[in-house]
Image (cartoon, rainbow, N blue to C red):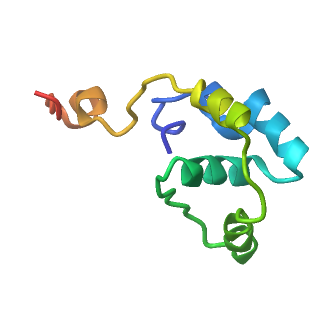
């Protein structure tokens, strides 16, 4: 993960963000379910990764509620415009060469 690569800090993990956890409590859902639902309502496909059957079930249990426009706007406001998959940000240290993907 990006935490282990020292490319992110625990404060970057949205599962623990007070806004996300507050919305989760209101809907009686987990923070992960809130973020999956947010992605679906934005017409994007979240790629959930787990090998645990209880998490697979939890990840599918997001079609019995909707996030309000106010919740969606608040979640959209969490965007920090960061790219975690940009090799230009980590390839030089890890591979000894600069590899920008946006030139």
The residue located at (16%, 30%) in the rendering is 102
In this rendering, would 28 be left or right of 66?
right
| Viewer-nearest residue: 24 or 63 | 63
On screen, 5 above or below 44?
above
- Asked where in the image residue 83 lies, by quadrant, the reply is top left
In the depicted view, which residue is nearer to us: 80 or 69?
69
Residue at 56% across, 55% down: 40
Which residue occupies 25% across, 36% down? Answer: 87
Report the residue that reaches farthest toward the front: 69
Left or right placement of residue 100 versus residue 44 in this view: left
Q: Nearer the viewer, residue 92 or 59?
A: 59
In the rendered image, the residue lying farthest to the bottom is: 53
Percent position (x, y) of residue 58?
74, 67
Q: Can you say which quadrant of the picture contains the C terminus?
A: top left
Is 1 positioned to the left or the right of 89 in the image? right
Q: Nearer the viewer, residue 97 or 11?
A: 11
Please name the residue shown 34% across and 40% down the image.
Answer: 85
Q: How many marks?
A: 0
x, y percentage for residue 47?
Answer: 49, 60
Residue 20: give x, y in percent of width and height.
Answer: 74, 36
List x then y, in percent, for residue 77. 59, 24
């Amino acid at each position: 993960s990006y935490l282990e690569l020292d490319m992110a800090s625990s404060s970057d993990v949205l599962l623990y963000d007070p806004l996300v956890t507050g919305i989760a409590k209101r809907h009686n859902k987990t923070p992960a379910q809130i973020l999956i639902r947010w992605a679906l309502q934005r017409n994007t496909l979240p790629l959930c990764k787990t090998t645990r059957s209880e998490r697979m079930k939890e990840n599918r249990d997001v079609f019995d509620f909707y996030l309000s426009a106010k919740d969606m706007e608040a979640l959209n406001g969490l965007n920090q415009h960061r790219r975690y998959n940009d090799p230009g940000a980590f390839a030089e240290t890890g591979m000894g060469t600069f590899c920008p993907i946006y030139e």
